[in-house]
Amino acid sequence: MADEEALSADEILDVVDEHDVVVGQAPRREVYAKRLRHRAAFVLARDPDGRIFVHRRTARKLVFPSLYDMFVGGVVGAGETYDAAARREAAEELGVDGPLAPVPLFRFLYETPEHTWWSAVYEVRVDGPVRPQPEEVDWYAFLTDDELHRRLGEWEWVPDGFEAYRRLREARA
């Protein structure tokens, strides 16, 4: 597991400007340490009944460990498209068989004093069973929109996913 963490920290990411144009590349650990702007893909996964996949991240995650999230996803690798990253991350984190086709919804720039990344938000339907990666997910369930909404004030959520979900709800209101 320590080797996986080291590989993740050494992963090369595209560094982008405020307009989401690539201006360089750097290892993930440097990107985080120096607050370099990069790219991430967020995928809201729904089951055939329309329930949303919600999970708690493992304690060993580099960013936002042990927090709840209503999205699967992650960083976009160097030279990778948002669409490819969304497909890869959704398949990996959900552990599903067969191809997934996340539908792009919108992009936004997530910025805090600690973090900055362009975020592409997607939605996907998952028809089969999920087998989330134990190194990524400590707990999971499919929740209805109402169940998720009730937990927004009860659980500690990853702030970027919370912001993406807020924007999604606002757009659909």
Image (cartoon, rainbow, N blue to C red):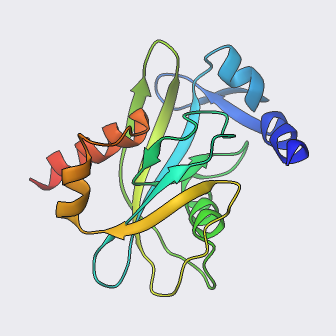
The image quadrant that residue 9 belongs to is: top right
Q: Is residue 65 left or right of residue 107?
A: right
Left or right relative to 4: residue 158? left
Q: Nearer the viewer, residue 105 or 50?
A: 50
- Residue 87 horizontal/vertical position (percent): 58, 66
Question: In the rendering, at what x and y percent does residue 111 appear?
Answer: 43, 22
Relative to 53, residue 42 above or below: above
Q: Is residue 109 above or below residue 136?
A: above
Name the residue furthest right: 3
| Residue projecting furthest to the left | 173
Q: Looking at the image, which residue is at 55% across and 77% down?
A: 130
Residue at image point 55% right, 53% down: 73
Residue drawn 46% across the image and 68% down it? 102
Residue at position x 70%, y 45% in the image: 77
Position of 136 relative to 164 (above/below)? below
| Residue 24, image x, y percentages | 72, 25
Along the line of sight, which residue is nearer the eye, 137 or 115?
Answer: 137
Total number of numbered discs in the rendering: 0
* Residue 141 image offset from top left, x and y in percent: 42, 67
Residue 17: name its quadrant. top right
